[in-house]
Amino acid sequence: MIIGLDHIAIAVADMDVAIARFLEDFGVPMSGREDVPTEQTSTAFFPLPGTRIELVTPLDGLGPIAASIDKRGEGIHHICFRTDDLDADIQRLRGKGYRFTSEQPRPGAHGTRVIFVHPKSAGGVLIELAEHPSEPT
Ligand code: CO
């Protein structure tokens, strides 16, 4: 079951510039940074009540975020719903005809399991589903 808006991810070409924008210009507190080698991305987190903004940039200039920036430029990359039962939601959505960008969930940041709904089956929006291991972060 979907239980919240986990985060909004923004693809950025220069992480230092983007961090300065959100942290210094807008004054949104940053909680930390984390590399996710399985996704070839580096991330920075800005928690806000009930959700967070997540900046994502390519690790070593490669991976899906690099491809996205090449194709569409910087900007909102995906939204992520938090689920309390990822496998059940995948099964339910598959039954309704939704397609995913991978067969199985993969490890995400903060110890989550994540999967992405293909934007072509979701009105052009890349939607991530994330299940946290225990307490939400
Ligand atoms: Co995400």
Image: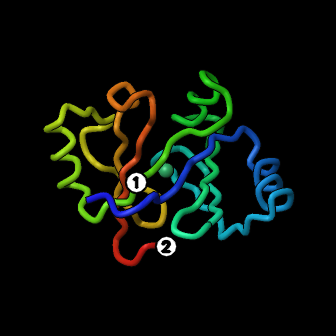
Q: Is residue 22 left or right of residue 121?
A: right
Q: Is residue 24 left or right of residue 115?
A: right
**Disc number for residue 81:** 1
Residue 35 image offset from top left, x and y in percent: 58, 56
Q: Secondary structure at mark 1?
A: strand
Residue nearest the observer in this picture, 4 or 107: 4
Residue nearest the observer in this picture, 50 or 30: 50
Which residue is most to the top? 71
Residue 66 image offset from top left, x and y in percent: 60, 32
> Residue beneath label 2, please?
137
**Ligand 1 within 8 angstroms of badge 2 C-beta:** no
Q: Secondary structure at mark 2?
A: loop
Q: Indicate which disc, 1 or 2, sits on the residue closer to the N terminus.
A: 1
Q: How many marks?
A: 2
Quarter in which the N terminus is drawn? bottom left
Which residue is most to the bottom? 135
Instruction: Report how far apart the C-alphas of labels 1 and 2 lie in the structure.
Output: 14 Å
User: In the displayed structure, would residue 53 be above or below residue 66?
Assistant: below
Residue 93 image offset from top left, x and y in percent: 21, 42
**Ligand 1 within 8 angstroms of badge 1 C-beta:** no
Residue at 74% in and 48% down: 15
What amino acid is labelled 1 in the image? Phe
The crowding category of the residue bearing disc 2, from other C-alpha atoms within 10 Å (few below 14, some 14 to 19, many at least 20), is few
Residue at 60% in and 21% down: 71
What amino acid is labelled 2 in the image? Thr
